[in-house]
Each structure stands twice: as structure tokens, then as C-alpha cells.
Image (cartoon, grey):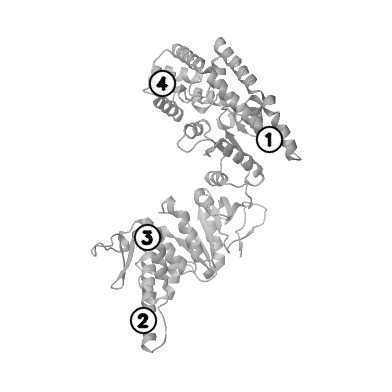
Amino acid sequence: MNLQLPPRNDSRPAEAVGFGGGTPLVIIGANGAGKTRFTRSILDTLGDQAMRLNALGALYDRPRGDHEYQPWELRSRLSAGAPAIAAQQGATTLEMLLARLMQDEMLNLIGYKLALADGRNTHLKPTRLDKVVELWQEIFPGNRVLIDSGKILFSRSFDKENDQYTALRLSDGERAVLYYTGAVLYAPRNASIFVESPEIFLHPTIISSLWNRLEALRPDCGFCYTTHDPDFASSRNGARVVWVRDCDAKACRWNYEVLPPQAGVTNEIYLALAGSRKPVLFIEGDNRSIDARLYPLIFPDFTVRSLGSCNKVIEATRTFNDLASFHKLDSMGIVDRDRRNEDEVAYLRRKNIMVPEVAEVENIFILEPIIHTMASRSGADPDRVVAKVRKALLSLFKAELRQQALMHTRHRVKRTVEYRVDARFDSIDSLEKHLENLVSEMNPRKSYEYFCRQFQQFVDSGDYNAILKVFNQKSMLANCNVAQMCGFKNKDAYIDGVLALLRSSAAGAETVREAVRICLQSPARNTAQ
């Protein structure tokens, strides 16, 4: 079906998107962007052919007295279908739902008994409650649902009869699964089911599987999810995605975009779009890495997203910039220099990807301005500390010079092979002939000797910055003793000290921040200040 979206707050016309038939719709946006109002505006046009689900309200909202409900509210649907349920005005929506399930179960049993009494050949039909119990016990294995004296009870024990309790003792997540499952079963045929914050109360390990099961349970319905959680959005494979950017609440108009259905819109793009209206900076590592702790403090005006590998950073930055015509946000990336040569670094910088003038992120913490600042703050003689760290680093690099040269040679060989083998060949003979000469053309020994000579020059001249640019060694930060000389217990405490300074407005914070930006050769330096 085609769903008409609300009016925009610019000159562009409102759009319609197709969903249903196995294609869900995701409405995503940052907190305060107006996505809930956006969704309700759609619901108001659909009437009783839509149904809205909200676990927070269903579990905790206890209305008192008369209350008018929209036709797309589950509570309104439950009340209209059963006068006895409607009388429970003080009950939560979940309690009304469980009562309705029990009522339908009893009516099914009564109908079955009456048919048997009339001598009709019949069988007991599966009920909504049967389906709820089956799915709930799949999601929470080892738990049982029991029916006793007209009540729905729960148990985690297969042996103790006294280990039975009502839904009130279930966790919020367990009750949310009950609510969602029962509510989906009460949606009318071919309905549009709108789910607000579908991830609320649920553990990340069950969210995707739960909604996959619920969508399969009602293939006739279209599912629309309103969320600020990009992880959930990216779990809805094949979904159409509407990004709500902003809202004019008084005029009931929105700034929104319908994301193009293309493979280039990856999980990382969802993360960037949903998280902020600020420019986006993609970085390596995970959310606990040094990169993720450092770079948001260097670029406070950017939304920083950790993507893991450098290849993901490069691809996400490229894709995001390709989509700039509709999201209108700037995008940049940062990857470690590792063993890239100057041509590789220049190529990446042309693609809006910053590459530091040091081999890896740990090396940033022993840039001379940073050592000088941290030593001064500890009361040590900064010039003496810098001199000692320089001497220690040169000694460490000299001891590993040939090993470092070998690793740089290996990188160059690997990159050369990738480039050469990726070339086009019109036959297997031409490929074989090309590969026969590849080793002699690459001449790895010549490259190795070149790196050995170059690195020896760095040592002989005491070129500290040049060594930081090529020295890949995770233990270097600990072994150069910068932490102890600056008054810290170990290298982790030293890193924490630098980060704590950056989070403050204390003297030296801007010196450290500027040293990192210069190291990155950041084209966004003025923007980020």
C-alpha cells in the first residue's frame, strides 16, 4: 500500500511511500525532531484501519474516569469488542489485553462444548492466547504460561506448583513481549500497525527476532516503526526509511527525507542520520576504543561514529558524501596512517578522510606539545621530560628498525599485488604472464633495504616526528615511560589524564586540542573550534 506522508515545511510536495507486503517502514530521527507528531499525523488519516502500539503507555498508563481514545488506539479496540473489558477503566492496556485474551479463550471453550453437546463433529480451534503463549515461550525459553481459575499465570519452575505468579511480577521486557504479541493479533485484517519505540524495555539480543516473528505472524499487515535507535532501524532488512529532521509544530509541517532504497545506505549511515543534525565524523574502532574517547573531544561540533575497520570508515564517508544532496550534512573520516605511503595518504585526504601525521592513534599521546603540557601540569620539568621521551623512543625504534622495515615492505608488496591483480586481462595466459614477472618487478628486497636506510637516517638525525609517523608498536606508549615521568601510574592513567584535560576548560586543554588537529592536518579546524 502507499502511505501519504505529512506536508513539508519547505516548497517541496509531500511524498507517498509504499510499505506492507513484507516491506516495513521505519520513521527515524533524533530526540526532539518531531517524529512522534509526524507519526500521529499519518495515523489521523487512516482511522480504524491503523493501530498504534506503545509499550510504555500500555504497561503503566492507568486512566481514571471517562477517556476518549482515537480509533487507532488498541484500548479503544479492546473496549469496543467486549463490554466486560470496557468496564475496567482503571486497568492498564496490558491488563485489558490479558482479560480480553482470557475472555476469547473462554468463549472458544464454551462454543466447543456446545458443539459437542449438539453432537456436531468439531475440534478445539487454536486461539489468540495459544499463539501468544507459543511465541512468549519461544522468546523466553524455560518459562511457562499457565491457566488457573480463569487467570493467566506464569512460572519458571516445572516442579513447584507454588512457584506461580501473575503478570505483575514479570519484568518490563517480559510484559512488553506479551503486550506486543497480543496486540498484533488483535489488529484488523490488512491493517497498518504503527509501533512507537519498538526497542523499549527489550534486551538487544531479542529485539530483532521478536519483530521478525511478529511480522511473520501477521503477513497481511504493514508494520511502521517510529524510533530513534539506528541499530533497530538497520535490523529491518529491506525497510523504507523516512528520516525526520525537524518539525514546525505550530504549522504541523516537517523537514523530512525519504532515504533512497540503495545498498550504499549502510547501518553506519543510519547511525549518522539518526544521531544528530551536526556534521558527521566517521572513525575507526568501537565505542570503547581510544579513537572514540579522543576524537569527540577534538571535534565537539561533529557527531562522531565508530565503525570498526578503516575500510568501513572510507566506504561510509564516500557513501555519505554521495548522499549530500538530500541530507545536507558534511561528512569526514579519520583513519590511522599505519604504513600508507604519501600517495595513499594524499588520495584519502582528497576524499575528506583525515590521516594523522603519526602511525596510529596511540602515537598522538606522545606528540611533543602534549607531553610538554602534561608534564607541566604534574609539576615536572617539561623540557627534561620531552628530552627523555625522545631518547627512549629513538632507542625503542632503533631496536626494532629491521622488523619495522619488514612490516612496511610487506604492506607495500600487499598493496602492489592488489593493484596489479585487479587489472583487466583478456585471457588466463596474459594473467599468468603478468604474475610470472610480478615478484621481480616488485623487488621486495630492494624495498626492504630502502626502508632500512630511511629508518636509519631517522635514528641518526634524531627525527622524532618522522619516527612517530612510521613506528607501529602498541607497547611503545608504555615503554617510553611518558606516563611515569608525567606523574601517572601507567599509560592507561596517562591517556585518561589527557582526556580529562580535554573535557575541561583548564589551561593547556586547547594546546592539546590544537596539537591533535595539526597532527590530523584537519581541514575542519576552524569549524570545530
Q: Is the C-beta separation of discs 1 and 3 under 8 Å?
A: no
Quadrant of res 175: bottom left
Name the spot of residue 396 as percent of width and height, x first: 48, 17
Q: What is the C-alpha distance between the residues marked 1 and 4?
A: 46 Å
273 or 122, which is in the foreground?
122
Q: From the viewer's side, name the closer residue of 35 and 151.
A: 151
Helix, strand or loop for disc 3: helix
The residue that mark 1 highlights is 421
Relative to 378, does residue 227 appear above or below in the rendering?
Answer: below
Is 411 left, or right, of 140 in this rendering? right
- Quadrant where the C terminus sits is top right
**Between marks 2 and 3, how big is the CA–CA gap?**
28 Å
Camera-near label (1 vs 3) is 1
Name which residue type carries label 1: Val
In space, the residues marked 4 and 3 are separated at their CA atoms by: 51 Å
Identified by mark 3, the residue type is Arg
Report which residue position mark 4 lands on.
483
Q: Amino acid at mark 4?
A: Ala
Q: Which residue matches tag 2?
A: 110
Left/right of residue 456 with respect to residue 155 in the rendered view: right
Mark found first going from the N terminus, 2 or 4: 2
Label 4 crowd bin: few (<14), some (14–19), many (20+), radius 10 Å: many
Few, some or many C-alpha atoms within 10 Å of disc 2 (few <14, some 14-19, many ≥20)? Answer: few
